[in-house]
């Protein structure tokens, strides 16, 4: 048998050397292996998820306050206190354990998170007295909680790109001490990637982030609500593409949503690379929320769920649980979380909506007011190319 193998190898090498074209092809193949870091064969697929982690409280009642009202300060204090303790009651630790369980069950190559809040406190606070010292003591770091839960399950994911959005600090009444504290919320999106795949199966480069120039300004808090995106270029099993996460403004400002969607398309999506664009876009394909930003995005991008369910666009709902995560009858009523893609390198095979139920009798009943979305793509080579920055 060894003689037969040696003969076959010698004959194969002789055949290659007899043809300059074949010899050059072998050199190029070896170079490609070197560039992409190892085996460029392997599993010809890509799995991803997008998960809105949900802060756990209804921020809308705070931003809706009128700062010119004579009782504004008392209303602000009552609203911020109620929302903070609502967030505490939502049990972020417990909810993020459920998210980690779903990631462990699916093992995506990469996934994105939105509303990955960082909540900090200063006690006693100084905002009541007009101070400006920022709160630094961490109460909940949703990204860290999720990473700790993944680590505890023996999973290997790391943050490869992130974007910090708004950063707001307000006074609250500490119901335990009776004093005034300052609560600070920083909103973030992030992209996480597996680090335990074989060489050449997944590598990332060029992390970027940016903010939209078209944003909402909330007089009640005296600050803009920054929104944006983050991205990374991905080298996966012999091809190259760009992976983008974004979170558009709410459907209450539909014209501004369209402007943000166009900024996304004219910004990180402006590339000759194939792209995957995931996140919470706050816009329903059937306009059940009154917004039309989905149409803007779908004119340039493919919707993985829509491609696989063309005859039933009304299914796949991803948002609608109540803000307290407490009402079992408050079900999803619109589809606003998506896995978009562009490029012939991607063929969607499955697209799933995962309602993150906690299977409990009391609140919180779900890990988020959103469903997570997942997609599995079959890959074809030829995805690399020169791209615009």
Image (cartoon, grey):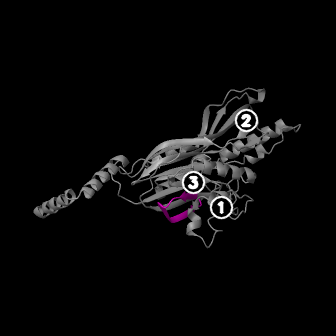
Contact between marks 3 and 2 (CB within 8 A): the answer is no
Marks 1, 3: nearer the viewer: 3
**Labelled disc at residue 108:** none
Queried whether the magenta region covers residue 351, the answer comes back as yes
For residue 288, above or below residue 92: below
Q: Which residues are magenta?
A: 339-355
| Crowd tier of the residue under label 3, counting other residues whose Cα lies within 10 Å: few below 14, some 14–19, many 20 or above | many
Contact between marks 1 and 3 (CB within 8 A): the answer is no
Residue at numbered disc 1 = 335
Front residue of 283/90: it is 283
Question: Tag 2 or tag 3, which sits nearer the N-term?
Answer: 2
Q: From the top left corner, tell me how far across and down residue 114 is, in percent.
A: 60, 48
Residue at x-position 54% and y-position 64%: 351
Q: Secondary structure at mark 1?
A: loop
For the N terminus, the image quarter is bottom left
Queried whether the magenta region covers residue 120, the answer comes back as no
Contact between marks 1 and 2 (CB within 8 A): the answer is no
Marks 1, 2: nearer the viewer: 1
Q: Secondary structure at mark 2?
A: strand
Residue at numbered disc 3 = 278
Secondary structure mainly formed by the magenta segment? strand
Place residue 212 in its image quadrant. top right
Disc 3/disc 2 C-alpha distance (Å): 31 Å
Residue at numbered disc 2 = 170
263 to the left or right of 40: right
Disc 1/disc 2 C-alpha distance (Å): 32 Å
Disc 1/disc 3 C-alpha distance (Å): 13 Å
Q: From the top left corner, tell me how far across and down residue 246 is, in percent.
A: 60, 49
Farthest front residue in view: 20
Question: Tag 3 or tag 1, which sits nearer the N-term?
Answer: 3
């Amino acid at each position: 048998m060894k003689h037969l193998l040696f003969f076959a190898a010698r004959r194969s090498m002789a055949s290659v050397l007899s043809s300059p074209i074949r010899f050059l092809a072998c050199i190029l193949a070896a170079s490609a292996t070197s560039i992409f870091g190892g085996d460029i064969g392997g599993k010809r697929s890509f799995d991803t998820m997008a998960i809105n982690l949900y802060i756990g409280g209804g921020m809308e009642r705070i931003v809706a306050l009128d700062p010119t009202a004579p009782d504004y300060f008392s209303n602000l204090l009552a609203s911020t206190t109620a929302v903070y303790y609502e967030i505490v009651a939502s049990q972020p630790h417990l909810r993020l354990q459920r998210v980690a369980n779903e990631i462990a069950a699916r093992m995506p190559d990469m996934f994105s998170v939105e509303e990955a809040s960082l909540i900090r406190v200063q006690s006693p606070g100084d905002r009541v007295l007009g101070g400006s010292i920022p709160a630094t003591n961490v109460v909940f770091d949703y990204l860290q909680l999720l990473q700790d839960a993944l680590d505890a399950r023996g999973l290997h994911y790391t943050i490869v790109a992130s974007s910090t959005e708004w950063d707001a600090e307000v006074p609250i009444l500490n119901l335990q001490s009776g004093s005034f504290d300052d609560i600070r919320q920083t909103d973030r999106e992030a992209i996480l990637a597996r680090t335990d795949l074989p060489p050449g199966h997944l590598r990332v480069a060029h992390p970027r982030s940016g903010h939209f120039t078209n944003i909402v300004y909330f007089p009640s808090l005296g600050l803009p609500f920054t929104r944006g995106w983050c991205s990374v270029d991905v080298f996966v099993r012999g091809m190259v593409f760009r992976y983008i996460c974004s979170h558009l403004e709410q459907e209450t400002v539909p014209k501004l949503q369209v402007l943000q969607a166009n900024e996304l398309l004219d910004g990180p999506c402006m590339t000759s690379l194939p792209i995957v664009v995931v996140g919470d876009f706050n816009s329903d394909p059937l306009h059940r929320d009154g917004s039309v930003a989905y149409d803007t995005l779908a004119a340039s991008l493919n919707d993985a769920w829509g491609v696989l369910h063309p005859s039933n666009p009304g299914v796949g709902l991803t948002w609608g649980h109540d803000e307290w995560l407490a009402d079992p009858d408050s079900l999803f009523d619109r589809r606003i979380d998506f896995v978009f893609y562009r490029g012939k390198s991607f063929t969607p095979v499955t697209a799933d909506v995962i309602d993150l139920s906690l299977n409990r009798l009391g609140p919180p009943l779900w890990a988020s007011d959103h469903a997570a979305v997942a997609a599995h793509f079959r890959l074809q080579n030829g995805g690399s190319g020169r791209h615009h920055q």
